[in-house]
Image: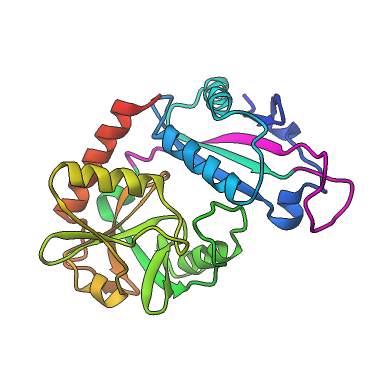
Amino acid sequence: MEQIAYVNGSFVPLSEAKVSIFDRGFLFADGIYEVAAVLDGKLIDNASHLARLERSVGEIELALPETTARIQEIQKELVARNDLVNGMVYLEVTRGADTGRDFAFPKNVKPTLIMFTSTKDIINAPSAKTGINVITVPDLRWARRDIKSVALLAQVLAKQAAAVAGAGEAWMIEDGKVTEGGSSSCFILTQDDVIVTRQNGSEILPGCTRKAVVALAEERQLRVEERAFSVEEALAAKEAFVTSASLFVQAVVSIDGKKVADGKPGPMTNRLREIYIEFAKATAV
């Protein structure tokens, strides 16, 4: 059965899902996106994703064409129509399509809203057991990385470099410090058992999974420090890991070909993954 997508008010077969060539998401990357995980047919941590969506569109003065409550209804309907058990729901909102190409915001144009699903078994991914290798690349992105913009060329180049190197992710470096992964938030566990992740700011995207993992760790009286760290510090750490909606908590076992500790997922990473999955299942909608 052909997959179903949502485009501007209609559920349509994926082959019929189309937007105008004048859509500003296509012409200017003038849009925002979100990705929510699905486990057992339910959305994971979706309130956090929708709150971030509202913040991002607000930062670029883009009005959502639907309320977040209605967007969640559409997400659920799409999951049901596609019989999705485990995977992702992608949504994108752009400033819409005008009759030509002009940089200034168009008047009287309705924003575009599209959604589609994909299948992925996040919990049983082989890399969850083995961990992933990462490479480092310069952070080439614009100055407002806290906005979840569809302008992802720098991340595409970073992820392609990782793919060519046989790595699972790229860590982006600025001023000698790790900002974040191409599509993930970065963490280390220091030798004195402090979980370190970069503080939120315009330099990084405020990750929803990152936020949940930090809160879950603090609830369990684990020490968490939000600050920048270097690759050298990561290589000297007990453990390293990344978080994202598409990975949950994923061990990093080497950086630029150098092992992190013994080159295997560590007990803290494994435990945080278990805790996050418990949280995800308990709060799914």
In the picture provided, is 251 more to the left or to the right than 144? Answer: left
- Magenta region's main secondary structure? loop
In the picture provided, is 141 more to the left or to the right than 275? Answer: right
| Colour approach in the figure | rainbow
Furthest toward the right, the residue is 99
Residue 152 visible (yes or no): yes
The picture places residue 219, in percent across and down from the top left corner, at 18, 41
In the picture provided, is 199 more to the left or to the right than 264? Answer: right
Up the image or down, 184 lies above or below 43; here it is below
Furthest toward the left, the residue is 192
Q: Residue at (54%, 67%) from the top-left corner?
A: 143
The picture places residue 248, in percent across and down from the top left corner, at 34, 45
Confirm whether the magenta stretch covers residue 5: no
Confirm whether the magenta stretch covers residue 121: yes
Residue 119 visible (yes or no): no
Q: Nearer the viewer, residue 29 or 147?
A: 147
Q: Nearer the viewer, residue 206 or 280?
A: 206
Q: How many marks?
A: 0
Quadrant hosting residue 86: top left
The quadrant in which the C terminus is found is: top left
Quadrant hosting residue 278: top left
- Residue interval drawn in magenta: 96-124
The picture places residue 149, in percent across and down from the top left corner, at 59, 53
The picture places residue 38, in percent across and down from the top left corner, at 43, 32
Q: Residue at (55%, 39%) from the top-left corner?
A: 90
Up the image or down, 264 lies above or below 222; here it is below
The quadrant in which the N terminus is found is: top right
Quadrant hosting residue 108: top right
In the picture provided, is 64 more to the left or to the right than 282? Answer: right
Q: Residue at (76%, 42%) from the top-left corner?
A: 96
